[in-house]
Image (cartoon, grey):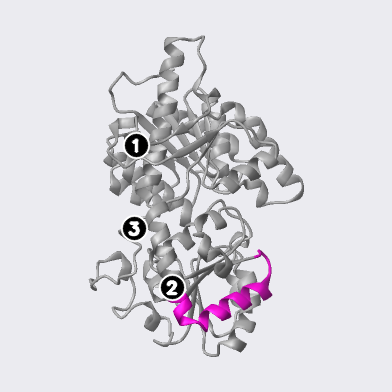
């Protein structure tokens, strides 16, 4: 096994299939933080916006033309990934989402420490035989996983109940507080917040009146994010809040189907470079997901000082301060409950303002991306220290067999100066 000399800068290889939205932001944020901390960072991913963005940060981007889901091309994709791994010679591999986790662990097979981050479990996204295959693979591939990183305790427990075994680490998602904040930046045509938008904000460009009650839903247009449930609730919301507008920010495979059933009061923006301007324009942000690990959109909206309504899926309760739960959490797949909660908040401006302030304070204290990056760095350091220890003393315990707490210490990887955060690890349910 290739090991870096003591004191050298470890090389990390991130793997990802075609992704957008939250997973792309996580990979980007980690890459930026790890480069700043002095790590050598390579990323294997398909071409496109994510590859361009990572390359602009200074990452060593390797073209890996993978599809989003497993299929006949998997064998050739694994072979290409083997060549990437052999060329990069990483000290640690970090695979993001199910497809990259599948291909990455087949390519590496435990020869270097491999971190797998599901970003929501694949077996929740499908049913029948496909779900059984996805679950069987996750159980089998645990042998090649040095640590499975979940973004919420609820996501970890769902994996445990499905028969998956550790070692685990729970590291909550974080967001960039410099980008997501309540204040509208001074207009500049090159500012990402205003890319393609009117200087007055996003409402005029899409025909939304300045003072119309505005509900915003940010996410990929797909079954997971539940925009169809929101459309089912929307007629009831309009009956109680005439003149309200709903904006679906994002693109995806369900756009045509959703647009075909949407009334005139629903606006579709398509893909946007940065959703911060839409969060700031919103009176209420809604994410009616069917499943998640811990969604980024509600955290970003709260960072912008906006109240949120989210469904009670994995990570939702952990992402909210306790005081917001009674006002902001609804059952998944329940249009009536969603309509009642959204309409009540649209009609209560003082409550919305209070919830927005509390949400902002919570995200600042618990979900700063710098804390998340520091926890990941500490995890890397623990795994690499364990490999060195096992190599020096083969009879000792390997890194994958240890359980405990990482926290309140500087990150071991690259001697990072990022503020540390507690990262809970476990090999047990």
Judging by the rendered image, the residue that carries numbered circle 2 is 354
Q: CA distance from mark 3 to mark 2?
A: 19 Å
The N terminus sits in image quarter: top left
Residue at 47%, 33% (x, y): give it. Answer: 405
Q: Position of residue 36 (x, y in %)?
A: 27, 41
Q: Is residue 338 visible?
A: yes
**Label 2 CA crowd tier, 10 Å (few <14, some 14–19, many 20+):** some
Q: Position of residue 214 (x, y in %)?
A: 47, 80
**Mark closer to the observer (3, 2):** 2
Judging by the rendered image, the residue that carries numbered circle 1 is 41
Q: Earlier in the sequence, mark 1 or mark 2?
A: 1
Q: Earlier in the sequence, mark 1 or mark 3?
A: 1
Judging by the rendered image, the residue that carries numbered circle 3 is 177
Q: Earlier in the sequence, mark 3 or mark 2?
A: 3
Segment colored magenta: 331-354
Is residue 274 positioned above or below 370 on the image?
below
Residue projecting furthest to the front? 323
**Mark closer to the observer (1, 2):** 2
Q: Can you tell which quarter of the image residue 211 is in?
A: bottom left
Is residue 82 toward the left or the right of residue 337 in the image? left
Which is more toward the observer, 278 or 152?
Answer: 152
Which is more toward the observer, 146 or 161?
Answer: 161
């Amino acid at each position: 096994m290739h090991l870096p000399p003591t004191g050298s800068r470890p090389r990390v290889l991130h793997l990802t299939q075609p992704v957008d939205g939250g997973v792309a932001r996580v990979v980007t944020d980690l890459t930026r933080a790890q480069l700043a901390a002095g790590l050598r960072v390579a990323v294997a991913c398909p071409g496109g916006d994510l590859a361009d963005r990572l390359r602009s940060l200074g990452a060593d981007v390797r073209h890996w033309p993978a599809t989003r889901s497993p299929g006949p091309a998997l064998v050739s994709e694994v072979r290409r990934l083997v060549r990437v791994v052999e060329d990069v010679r990483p000290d640690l591999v970090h695979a993001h989402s199910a497809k990259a986790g599948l291909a990455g662990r087949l390519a590496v097979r435990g020869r270097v420490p491999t971190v797998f981050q599901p970003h929501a479990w694949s077996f929740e996204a499908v049913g029948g035989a496909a779900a059984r295959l996805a679950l069987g693979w996750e159980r089998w591939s645990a042998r090649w996983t040095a640590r499975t990183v979940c973004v919420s305790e609820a996501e970890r427990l769902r994996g445990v109940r499905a028969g998956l075994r550790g070692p685990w680490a729970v590291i909550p998602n974080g967001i960039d507080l410099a980008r997501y904040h309540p204040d509208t930046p001074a207009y500049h045509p090159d500012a990402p917040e205003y890319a393609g938008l009117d200087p007055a904000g996003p409402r005029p460009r899409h025909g939304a009146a300045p003072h119309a009650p505005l509900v915003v839903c940010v996410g990929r247009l797909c079954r997971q994010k539940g925009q169809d449930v929101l459309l089912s609730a929307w007629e009831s919301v309009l009956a109680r809040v005439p003149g309200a507008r709903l904006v679906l920010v994002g693109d995806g495979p369900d756009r045509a189907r959703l647009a075909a059933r949407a009334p005139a009061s629903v606006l579709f923006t398509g893909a946007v470079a940065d959703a911060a301007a839409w969060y700031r324009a919103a009176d209420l942000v809604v994410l009616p997901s069917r499943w998640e690990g811990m969604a980024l959109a509600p955290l970003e909206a709260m960072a912008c000082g906006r109240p949120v309504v989210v469904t009670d899926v994995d990570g939702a309760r952990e992402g909210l301060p306790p005081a917001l739960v009674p006002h902001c959490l609804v059952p998944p797949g329940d249009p009536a409950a969603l309509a009642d909660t959204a309409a009540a908040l649209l009609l209560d401006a003082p409550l919305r303002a209070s919830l927005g302030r509390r949400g902002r304070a919570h995200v600042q204290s618990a979900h700063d991306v710098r804390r998340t990056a520091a926890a990941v760095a500490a995890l890397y350091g623990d795994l690499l220290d364990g490999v060195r220890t096992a190599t020096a003393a083969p009879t000792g315990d390997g890194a994958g067999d240890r359980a405990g707490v990482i926290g309140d210490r500087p990150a071991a990887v690259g001697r990072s100066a990022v503020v540390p955060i507690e990262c809970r690890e476990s090999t047990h349910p």
